[in-house]
Image (cartoon, helix red, strand yellow):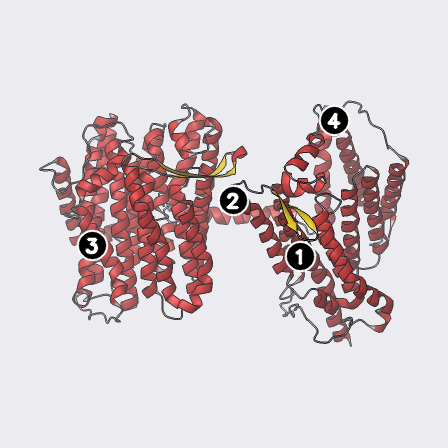
Amino acid sequence: MISFILLHFVAAAVAPALAPRFDRRIFLLLALVPAATFVWLLPRVADVLAGQTQTETLTWIPQLGLNVDLTLNPLSGVLALLVTSIGALVLVYCAWYFREGDTEIWRFSAVLTAFAGSMLGLVLADNIYLLFIFWELTTVLSYLLIGHNPERRANRIAAMNALLVTTFGGLSMFVGLIILHITTGETTLSGLMTNPPESSAIVTAAVMLVLVGALSKSALLPFHFWLPGAMAAPTPVSAYLHAAAMVKAGVYLVALLAPVYASTPGWRPVLVTLGISTMILGGLRALRQYDAKLLIAYGTVSQLGFLIAIVGLGTQSAAFAGIAMLCAHALFKSALFLIVGVIDRSAGTRDIRELSGLRKKRPTLFVATVAATSSMAGLPPLFGFTAKEAVFNAFLDANTDLGWGGWGTAALIGILAGAVLTIAYSLRFVWGVFGDKPGLDDTPLREFSVFFKAVPIFLAFCSVAAGFAGGWLTKTFTAYSAQFPAGAHEPVLTLWHGFTPALGLTIVCILLGVALFVGRHPVAWFQHLLVDNLPFPDAERGYRTTLRGLDRLAIEITGRTQRGSLPVYLGIVVLVVAIVPGSAMLRAWQPPEFHLFDNRIQLAAGIIMVVAAILTVRSRRRLRAVLMVGVTGYGMALLFAASGAPDLALTQVLIETFLLVTFVLVVRRLPPFFSDRPFNIARWVRVAIGAATGIAVAGFGIIATNARIFEPISTNWAKPAKEYGGGTNIVNVALVDIRAWDTLGELSVLVVAATGVASLIFLITDRSGIQKRPHRVVTPDSNDWLSANLHDDRRSLVFEIVTRVVFHAVIVFSIYLMLSGHNSPGGGFAGGLVVGLALMIRYLAGGREELDNAAPVDAGMVLGTGLAVAALAGLLPTLLGGDVLQTATIDIPIPLFGELHLVTSVFFDVGVYLVVVGVALDVLRSLGSRIDEQIEDEEAVSA
């Protein structure tokens, strides 16, 4: 299972590279992936239905209960077959839906394939955190698919609405799952089912939060409005995401939890009430639509409410009927969406007021449409008929199975009303698309390949065939419904139950639905009358009002707090730092035991740092203040060295040197002196804030070290660093092995910070809108020793020659530091800083041309490569049966040189090395080369 999920993502990754060569035929290649997965699943689902268990587990972070746990059960097996089969068919359909030479095929094909993999992972995931990851992946990828044409405003709005609504639901679900995890100690869905928590208010709240996620994903009231808007997406997206995949995720989650959690207070009232309300509302909205795709979309909203009401009922017969209806809906609704796509491409319109005579010109497609809509309406002998009769039986048995009494009758009436509306809008669709309209000429149609129509015709045929496969389907769905207590009657799918109440209800629904369609004009008039004169609540209007309110609130808060004053921002930050630990110290203050220094070197370093800090505060020249700040940094390095921490001292010296020169580069564009304002109350406030912060931080450090009651864990790191990390330099081993997760997160922060610096400096336009010249890396063609382009009064021949002579030696030294860091002071971070200093020297000696000559690569490429190398180094052990970021020691014999002792974490350190080099190069280009260009532009203008 893991392999086939990964195969989808691998196919998605290579699709952009293959799409230019294969054009739209790339979809046929990609369809092989879900098709192969479907074939692989078939025998395994059969084994599951026979009672066998199919699970796969990949250890990830067992300490946190984070493992890749996948399971194939009767429910997930059925959903996985739907996801893969319809996914493969939709990809085949895309090969004729898109036009030859479409420049966006590479992106759409990749995202759609990745979505199919995410949906497959969602239905197979057993670990709740893995479920959430796939859940959010489907959200993000659906955002990209719905917004496929970002130049259209409707697509952007629809994509954002879907993203915000489903993300809100996903986060609510995540909170609920976390609460259930904490309550039960279980991190798997199977564990939550076999070891459910005792009923309590917190458990009820958790279950309700999970249901919020399910309802938002399946577009139920009040979250329903995002789905019709998502019809701005290409038709294949609607056919897959909104008929067979994404919107079914909420139904799947409810069905999965129902066997155990349906007895939770509020479960049935919430789901049945919202489900039936959504079913009726969607049906009424569908009767008002003239866009064939929107008509089907509101019908989908109605059917999703129908499904949630069924599976939410929580009885054996309802569970059986729910899974049957879910499969029937996936078949007929995906077929109808794809038929709309064919009509849209052929006729150039989806407006049913402009379509006429298609029945005569497209008879095969007409027959397929009648079959699919008949299944949707629940007419015999289609799959939808057998499933809907099972639904009627389930609600008829609800009074007996649940003792609902009047509530069961009310729910049944609501279901019948929704069924009547379903028949009416089904007839509206068939008549609107294929009927002959009086006074309207036959719509001219373009010819398309027969393969374009083959997929929806095949899906419609499946709806017909499934109606006659009741016996086999009964065995399939019973494997899931058997988890529920037995009801009054054993559920079964068949075309003929005899003269039963369910059959009578079906006949009544058909008659009323036909009557509703025949009287569509007065019905439409009545609907408009109600909508125009009664203040019905509008969920979408409420959503937009909420967003506008949040935007307004954000503007008000920003306007009151963000005044554009950096001293105010910094003062607030440091004041909080002083108040929070300071208040804690005041409540638990005890005279601490400490001594000022251990040796004279520490005393000297402390005096130097204090004097430098005072001179920094008293300095009026910016450059002098920068230099004094640098002195405090070097003093800290001296303290590290005097305290027996050479690795920290080395890193501190390197980073302080790099920052010192960077500050000098920035100071070039600032006035040489600080403002000479009088010593007013504002300056006294700053003095007070600074003093309070210093005292609070120092006091907190002293008290924290004196409050320790256990032995520091760092004292025991030497042994595991040697045994498990394969090194004696505890600091470096901690960074790349013991606490490598922290380092990986810090690397990500470094990449983001470097990107932020570049974004602030490399502006395309200035505030006036004047176009700026983008910076380009220039590699000189000459063979000069140094590509210096500095003015004569800024050049130093000795500096230039020494720079070129020592540069390569410094680079070699940086590599030595990186490779030796496991057992000696150094490591990837220090080595990367040495490269940054070497590049800085080249820049100072020869200017930006010399920097580009020394590093003719894009800084972003180096950053991305470094982060990728670090991530891959962490994932590689999992492919060899180990844990993420696990270290191994390898001894490699080398002829003549002896044996090479290699620790695999060195590859992670290579990633650290590259990220630091990328950050240094980015900073030099942003604050060095770019500022040089600005100065040159200003000098050229002034000249």
* Disc 2: CA contacts within 10 A as few (<14), some (14-19) or many (>=20): few
Q: Nearer the viewer, residue 794 or 820?
A: 820
Among the two numbered marks 1 and 4 on one chain, the one whose residue lies closer to the N terminus? 4
Q: Considering the numbered disc 2 on the image, is that residue within a helix, a strand or a loop?
A: loop
Mark 2, mark 3: which one is toward the viewer? 2
Asked whether disc 1 touches disc 3, contact meaning CB atoms under 8 Å apart, the reply is no
Is residue 282 found left or right of 842 in the rendered image? left
Asked whether disc 2 touches disc 3, contact meaning CB atoms under 8 Å apart, the reply is no
**Which residue type does callout 1 highlight?**
Gly
**Which residue type does callout 3 highlight?**
Phe
Residue at left 18%, top 45%? Answer: 469
* Disc 1: CA contacts within 10 A as few (<14), some (14-19) or many (>=20): many
Among the two numbered marks 2 and 3 on one chain, the one whose residue lies closer to the N terminus? 3
Q: Gap between marks 1 and 3, in whole Å?
A: 58 Å
- Pointer 2: what residue? 880
- Pointer 3: what residue? 461
**Which residue type does callout 2 highlight?**
Leu
Residue 837 position in % (x across, y down)? 76, 57
Among the two numbered marks 1 and 3 on one chain, the one whose residue lies closer to the N terminus? 3
Residue 159 position in % (x across, y down)? 43, 54
Q: Considering the numbered disc 1 on the image, is that residue within a helix, a strand or a loop?
A: helix
